[in-house]
Amino acid sequence: MAYQAEISRSNPTCFLFLVDQSGSMADPFGSSVGRSKADELATILNRLLASLVIRCSKDEGVRDYFEVGVLGYGGGKVAPALAGAVANTPIVPIGRLADEPLRVEDRLQKVPDGAGGLVEQSVKFPIWVDPCAEGGTPMTEALAQGHTALRDWVGRHPGAFPPVVFNITDGEATDGDPTPAAERLRSLGTDDGSTLLFNVHLSERRAPSVEFPNTDEALADAFARRLFTMSSPLPPHLQLAARQEGYEAPEGSRGFVFNADAAAVIQFLDIGTRPANLR
Amino acid sequence: MATSRRGYRYAVADGASASAFARLWAHLLVHAYAGGSLGGPTLEGDLAPAQARWAELVGRRRLPWYAQEQTRRGAFAALVGLTLDVDQRWSGLAVGDCCLFQVRGDALVTAIPLNDPGQFTVRPLLLCSRPVANGDLRSAGAVVTAEGTWQPGDTFLLMSDALAALFLSGVHACGDRPLAALDFDGTAAGFRSWIRRSRSARCLRNDDVSLLWLDVDADHRALA
């Protein structure tokens, strides 16, 4: 049965993020006032990467359960988007990522005070990805470069839980139909199953989102339907995780959210990065 | 385990490996219970000395950002405790998914806080080394207490979650002899071998396991 492989230091899995850095990412993000999609997405990604590090952090240090890559696409090019000492590296073990952020900021965060209220507390906030918004949307090339990086990875990890790729975008590809490149990416696999490709569409309008659909009937246009077609069905453990978070996630649900606001993106990525069988 | 004039106290705690310094926190919880300083009705306040000790020990270390962040959130652990009084009464306390079972003859007469293998979830509510995170435990029903009487020949079992789930599955399968669900010869080597077999057969989740097996003998002593 697929998607059952134990994730361990000797058998890690891989998360690859393809991040739209085109010019339109400078526009406001849904209801966020004064914050661009690029700003919000960088914050979301940095928080998610920190969360992945903390999930792997044990008393003796960070265990390399995961390997992580971030490819940015925009400005006419596709390139690794991690900054700092891990810059220009397509995929890095989570322990190295933990030890080499670009910088660590102290940020204030509201946390429960235990008496029903909230109190501000200083938290450590590492930065690996800075916001960027420029040029067109070479999504097809990003999927192709993701394929190149993961072809090597699955070759080195034939027994691993398959890679999970998140493609996060606010618009259509400007370098042709990305569907064949998405198919090639999904065709890469390990003994435990095919690579999972999940798509996240960011909204700049206050429009209803469509989350984990199993049909394209509710999707408004050809672009949305194309992203749906490109998305992998959720394996059982992620379908269960989505349901536990209150989504309907019917049989055949795909890893796809359309018109997502910041909260929906955060929850989608949280669900999508939950391991099935972490040792 | 600890003894006093009034009886014996036993505890098992299971630190959540996803949190920082959970082993230390579990260790402190077991000692606090065995030392008689944790009670069901006043548990949240009773934890203060152990929480202060955890913070003191952790605070001495120089930590990278991720360990600082984990430490800010606190360590989490499940705890189950049993007190056997000399007057043949017992009391139990459980938070999280470590379990206490009482077996009398061919009957499982007590199972707290869980009594069905389907009740074990990925995210149980656990005791935290930061007081702020324990505020909702009681209202959520996560602080479970029980009491009863014991007889010579009774067996008490304290288990961490994965083993407890396996045990309850076995009890459901062969309900007329609960202890048959613990399919080993009573030795430490036999236990390790049975755990390995159960993991290989995927009957047992790949998780740490702890078992405290207490047979109460005819002299009213508990033999661990």
Image: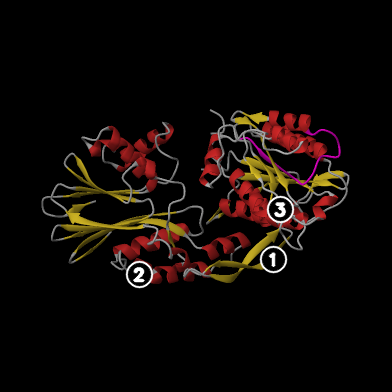
Q: Is residue A7 left or right of residue A138?
A: left
- Type of residue at label 1? Glu
Per the model, the C-alpha gap separating discs 2 and 1 is 36 Å
Q: Is residue A52 left or right of residue A277?
A: right
Q: Closer to the N terminus: mark 1 or mark 3?
A: 1
**Residue A277 visible from this viewpoint:** no
CB contact under 8 Å: marks 2 and 3:
no
Magenta stretch prevailing secondary structure: loop
Q: Is residue A59 left or right of residue A28?
A: left
Chain that bears disc 2: B
Q: Which residue is mark 2?
A: B46
* Magenta-highlighted residues: A162-178
**Residue A253 visible from this viewpoint:** yes
Q: Which residue is mark 1?
A: A105
Per the model, the C-alpha gap separating discs 1 and 3 is 31 Å
Q: Image height check: is B136 above or below B217?
A: below
Where is residue B52 shown, x and y percent of the image?
44, 71
**CA neighbours of label 1 inside 10 A, class few (<14), some (14 to 19), many (20+):** few
Q: Residue at x 46, y 50 (%)?
A: B123
Q: Spot the residue most to the left.
A: B218
Callout 2 secondary element: helix
